[in-house]
């Protein structure tokens, strides 16, 4: 199965379908990532705060794949923001991952009240220029925070990884991203499992003889989102990767987009945890 690539604004590319490891122990992440790579995933999303960078890195190293065959993302935690702090935190992440570069480094949250994300992104530029992160981006950034980074650093982040699932299609941010050449990456793409029982999702899935998870992932892919579903169950890891053999109609995409829903995670406008 060939996963399409999404081209980033710095010329590198990310597989449109990857694998997330939030809320998985270090050993659990090792096993889940090993299984995902065996099934065919070639992109893995971790973060310092997940406390499983080591297990994730170990699974990649042991996979038998060349390092450049796997797209690896990690994220800077909020308490590490600031120019010098970021440089130190990045070194520590690389150490835990057991690699000498990541494909994508993300600022996990803007933490608007702390007001350090612009300096943090400047440190990201230095890291990228050193070759140790191939691309740099952000996560949970609002339009206002994106505008400030662009205006004050002269660089547009490659990706904004945001909460996005049926019921939270993020039309405003997706339009801003499209206008500025920022790739949209969806976190909690299955609504942490909550979206799987939505009536429209269940009906669309049945019409194609696929599972609700597969219908939702297909919806993301057709919207152009990069998507990183998580599971530790081998059958589900395989199921979530098997989403390239059918296509939703425009009407089916619109039905899923129109679902009433809500945010599951914190609102980035007010999330100031450090
Ligand atoms: P998700 O939407 O991927 O849902 C995962 C849950 O859905 C699983 O725990 C399981 O319960 C269920 N599930 C998965 N596949 C299924 C299937 N085929 N059938 C039935 N149930 C299934 O949720 P997530 O883990 O929150 O998000 C995915 C990834 O996004 C994370 O692992 C992480 O890498 C990333 N993420 C990033 C942020 C951020 O702030 N940047 C926040 C949350 C998550």
Image (cartoon, rainbow, N blue to C red):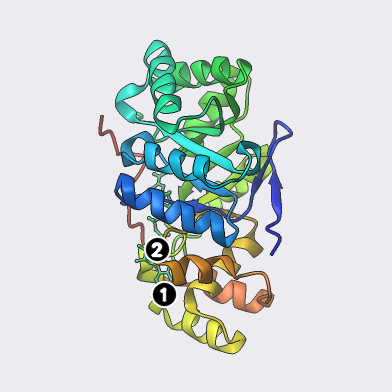
> Residue 248 or 15: which is nearer the viewer?
15
Q: Is mark 1 within 8 Å of ligand 1?
A: yes
* Residue tagged 2: 191
Tag 2, which secondary structure?
Answer: helix
Q: Is mark 2 within 8 Å of ligand 1?
A: yes
133 relative to 90 in the view: left or right: right
* Residue tagged 1: 196
**Number of other residues with Cα within 10 Å of mark 1, as a class: few under 14, some 14 to 19, many 20 or more:** many
> Residue 271 or 190: which is nearer the viewer?
190
Q: Image point 42% across, 25% down: which residue?
A: 95
**Residue 78 versus residue 269 in the image, above or below:** above
101 relative to 270 in the view: left or right: right
10 relative to 219 in the view: left or right: right
Q: Image point 40% across, 48% down: which residue?
A: 30
Dividing the image into 4 quarters, which one contains the N terminus?
bottom right
Ligand 1 sits in which quadrant?
Answer: bottom left
Percent x, y for residue 266? 31, 47
**Number of other residues with Cα within 10 Å of mark 2, as a class: few under 14, some 14 to 19, many 20 or more:** many
Percent x, y for residue 158? 61, 35
């Amino acid at each position: 199965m060939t996963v399409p690539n999404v081209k980033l604004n710095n010329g590198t590319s990310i597989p449109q379908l990857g694998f997330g490891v939030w809320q998985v122990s270090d050993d659990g992440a090792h096993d889940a990532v090993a299984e995902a790579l065996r099934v065919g995933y070639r992109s893995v999303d971790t973060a310092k705060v997940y406390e499983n960078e080591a297990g994730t890195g170990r699974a990649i190293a042991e996979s038998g794949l060349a390092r450049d065959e796997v797209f690896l993302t990690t994220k800077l935690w909020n308490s590490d923001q600031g120019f010098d702090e970021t440089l130190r935190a990045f070194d520590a992440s690389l150490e835990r991952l057991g690699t000498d570069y990541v494909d994508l480094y993300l600022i996990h949250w803007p933490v608007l009240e702390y007001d350090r994300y612009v300096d943090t992104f400047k440190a990201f530029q230095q890291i990228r220029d050193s070759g140790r992160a191939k691309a740099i981006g952000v996560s949970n950034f609002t339009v206002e925070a994106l505008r400030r980074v662009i205006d004050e650093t002269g660089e547009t982040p490659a990706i904004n990884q945001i909460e996005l699932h049926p019921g939270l299609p993020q039309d405003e941010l997706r339009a801003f991203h499209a206008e500025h050449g920022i790739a949209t990456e969806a976190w909690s793409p299955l609504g942490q499992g909550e979206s799987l029982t939505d009536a429209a999702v269940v009906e669309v899935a049945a019409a194609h003889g696929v599972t609700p998870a597969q219908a939702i992932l297909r919806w993301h892919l057709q919207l152009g989102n990069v998507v990183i579903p998580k599971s530790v169950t081998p059958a589900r890891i395989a199921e979530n990767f098997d989403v390239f053999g059918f296509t939703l109609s425009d009407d089916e995409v619109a039905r899923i987009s129109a679902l009433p829903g809500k945010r599951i995670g914190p609102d980035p406008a007010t999330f100031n945890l450090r």
